[in-house]
Image: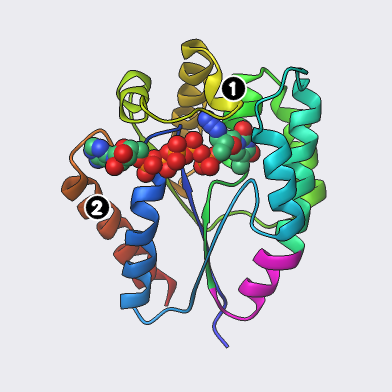
Amino acid sequence: MADGRFITLEGGEGVGKTTNLEFVVDRLKQHGLDVVVTREPGGTPVAEELRDLLLRVRDDEMVPLAELLLMFAGRAQHVEQLVKPALAKGQWVVCDRFTDATYAYQGGGRGIDDRQIALLEEMVQGPLRPDLTIYLDVPVQIAAERIAGREHDRIERERVEFFESVRATYIARAREYSRIQLVDAAADIEQVQADIALILDYFVGSAD
Ligand code: Z5A
């Protein structure tokens, strides 16, 4: 049986991950692939409960280390119960956010040292890393305008500087890791999806 592949979608809030997730899945299915769609935080019942805990707006402040550990607690459940078994069955796993988001939000945004994140990444994932990451890049102001009318969760209520640091971290990681493909997602949706299609078709072609 052919090995599965692990594809993640990343970006700040409002960049179009939800909008483009379905497009990614359909494109992979057109290639005849068996696709599983999931998300983080979340993806399994326990991890979805932790997601609720992480994103719910409350009066009591959550300290950055607690936020980091909860992200990885949910990831441990998700990786063991869903991601690894699906990959072992030869399925292609498409995940809305993964550990690059931890480096961007808890690292870039909250200021937690990358080495602490890397320790947890190793503990929870072992050698598992995404095979391909599509990073949707949109300037913070434009993304904020796109989701202006929505109710914001706990993390979405952060200041502009927080989201600028998140974006800068994603861009730096896209320069560092060749698996991370940056897409200009401020362009119109047809152009964004044409760019995503090119990346996916090339990736699928080279994965045979
Ligand atoms: N988080 C973390 O801190 N650490 C971690 O390790 C992980 C996550 C894994 C939940 O993520 C939060 O968890 C997130 C990071 C944190 N918090 N924040 N901020 P999420 O993925 O569930 O939530 P989100 O990032 O806030 O998703 P979102 O708000 O739903 O945004 P989106 O899915 O990227 O955007 P969208 O809903 O597809 O599009 C937004 C609007 O723009 C919509 O009206 C679209 O029609 C429109 N749109 C989309 N594309 C275009 C283009 N190209 N042009 C014009 N308009 C467009």
- Report whether the residue tagged 1 is closer than 8 Å to ligand 1: no
Instruction: List x then y, in percent, for residue 29.
Output: 37, 75
The residue furthest bottom is 1
Instruction: Choose top left, top right, bottom left or bottom right for residue 21.
Output: bottom left
- What's the CA distance linking mark 2 and mark 1? 28 Å
Whether the magenta-drawn stretch holds residue 120 is answered as no
Instruction: List x then y, in percent, for residue 164.
Output: 46, 17
User: Mainly helix, strand or loop, the magenta region?
Assistant: helix
Q: Kindly identify the amino acid type of the residue bearing the numbered disc 1.
A: Gly
Name the residue rendered at 37%, 60% in the picture: 22
Whether the magenta-drawn stretch holds residue 84 is answered as yes
Of residue 173 and residue 7, the one placed in the foreground of this image is 7
Residue 168 to residue 42: above or below = above
Query: Badge 2, how many Cα within 10 Å: few under 14, some, many 20+?
Result: some
Q: Kindly identify the amino acid type of the residue bearing the numbered disc 2.
A: Gln
Residue 26 to residue 112: above or below = below
Of residue 11 and residue 178, the one placed in the foreground of this image is 11
The stretch of residues the image draws in magenta is 81-91
Residue 121: image tag:
none
Q: Which residue lies under the disc numbered 1?
A: 108
Q: Which residue lies under the disc numbered 2?
A: 193
Ligand 1: image quarter: top left
Residue 140 to residue 75: above or below = above
Colour treatment of the image: rainbow
Instruction: Choose top left, top right, bottom left or bottom right for residue 38.
Output: bottom right
Name the residue rendered at 66%, 19% in the picture: 110
Determine if residue 5 is in view: yes
